[in-house]
Image (tube, grey):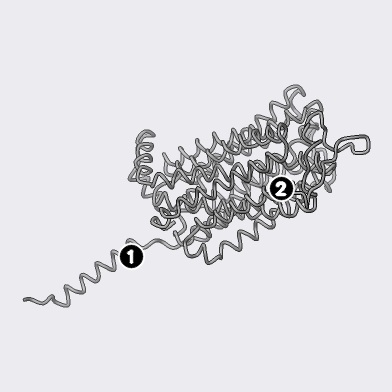
Amino acid sequence: MELPSPESNNEKTSRLNEGKEENEEPPTQWRLIIICATIYFLITTVLTTLNVVAYLYLKNIDPSISPVYAGLHLASAKFGHAIGTVAFAVYAYSYKCFTKPLLIGRVISIFSIILYLGILMFPESSRRYVFLISFLMQSFAEGSLIVMRSYIPRVSTEKDRHAAYGIISGAVMMSILAGPGIQMSADFLPVVELYSRLELRGFTYPIWIALFLCVLAMFLISNKLEDPTPMEEEKKLTHGSFVTSMATAIEQVSLVDKAVLGMIFFERIICSVAFSALLAVFAPYIQTTFNSDNSVIYTAGAQGVAGIVSMLTVAFFIFSPILKSGRCSLLLFFSLSCYFFMYLYSFPWSPISEPITVMSTENPHGCNTTELAWCVVQSHVKMWYWLPVIVFLFAMAVPTSMISIDTVYSKLLGDIDQNIMQGALVLVDDIASSVAPIVTMKIYTSYGLDALWLALAGAALVGFFAWILMIPKMRKLKL
């Protein structure tokens, strides 16, 4: 029997080492992730800043506007965001690029803000329509952020994926703080007339700041953000028609576990409903049940505290041993538990509750029984028992659900161009976030607090037990 020569052994070892090097996952590019998070912060801050001043600005440009009509800008924002998400996801997938869609989005955003600033140049009767068009364009432009969600898997390893998405979640939480902060700072600045009806004042300073942030984001995208190398290779290999690109996307998704994929979409809907419901009911709940005309102050204060707690939560879980071990799926249990206890605690249990104050001469800000008949018979949790607990639980639930679902979803999709599938998840999120406030307010006005809190607690509980069913599959898939 002939023994292998030392040379042949060396050749085999060399080939094995080469194979390992070829299959080895490239290291996480933290510089690009930080740039990505910074751009994410700038873009989301633009929209939160405009949202903060929206109603005040609208009342000044058209005093006859009603609160109901003013609320349409939120609906147009969701509608525009959904369309923008789909359009930019398809564009990025078809042309295998990242920076182009983001730059197109920034151009649309700049035009939208300029239109927003120039509303006073239009006849008073048409200003409200210009306002809605501006918001529709702005939210459409924000839909370009979908490419960032598929950018993260390209520049991070599976081991670091949770930390990468955690940094993005932290950027979103910071933008929630930045919007009200910009508005509060603008209130102390002097009024300056620039040209005719174009002026700087409390409700227009933030719009100019938003314009500056948009230009800054555009600079970072064009000069600092890089299309990752895999995308350049794919551009050479998969150059084809739109139909071919969609066929390739469907073929790639067909290999993904359908049960886990469907459950992720279901959990995204549950978390979107739990998130949007509280946002929708918070201000009217504070005003009508706590007999207070300071709902704006309470909302701003709660938003500020929630933002800080959210960022601390993100920082904690980024370095958590649970996430470092790769079990991001477990984090969703924590988020759903926070949502469940938040809404269950809001139910008017007798030891911590009191009757709702009904509107009267002595209590002009109490609950109006002609609009909300249930005020007479129902109770609510005392304000300072309710508000701190809700803010802390909400602040921990939101970022942890984002990190968990985004990381698990990204890992499940694997090493493919994720633009289309990330767009599908965001589209579902937008639809749920649009429908949830409508259903929430219908339950609130027709049936009262008891039914509302129990329904939302029940939804979170269903999500919790549904996620348990996926544990065996997720263990097998190492999610």
* Crowding near the residue tagged with mark 2, few <14, some 14–19, many ≥20 C-alpha atoms within 10 Å: many
User: Quick check: 136 above or below 142?
Assistant: above
Q: CA distance from mark 2 to mark 1?
A: 55 Å
The front one of 397 and 57 is: 397
**With respect to residue 266, does 136 lie above or below?**
above
Q: Amino acid at mark 2?
A: Ser
Q: Is residue 381 above or below residue 31?
A: above
Q: Residue furthest left?
A: 1
Q: Amino acid at mark 1?
A: Glu
* Position of the N terminus by quadrant: bottom left
**Which residue is labeled 2 in the image?**
346
Q: Residue 384 location, x and y as percent? A: 80, 53
Residue in the image at 74% along x and 29% along y: 68
Question: Which residue bears the numbered disc 1?
Answer: 21
Q: Pointer 2 and pointer 1: residues touching (CB < 8 Å)? A: no
Q: Considering the numbered disc 2 on the image, is that residue within a helix, a strand or a loop?
A: helix
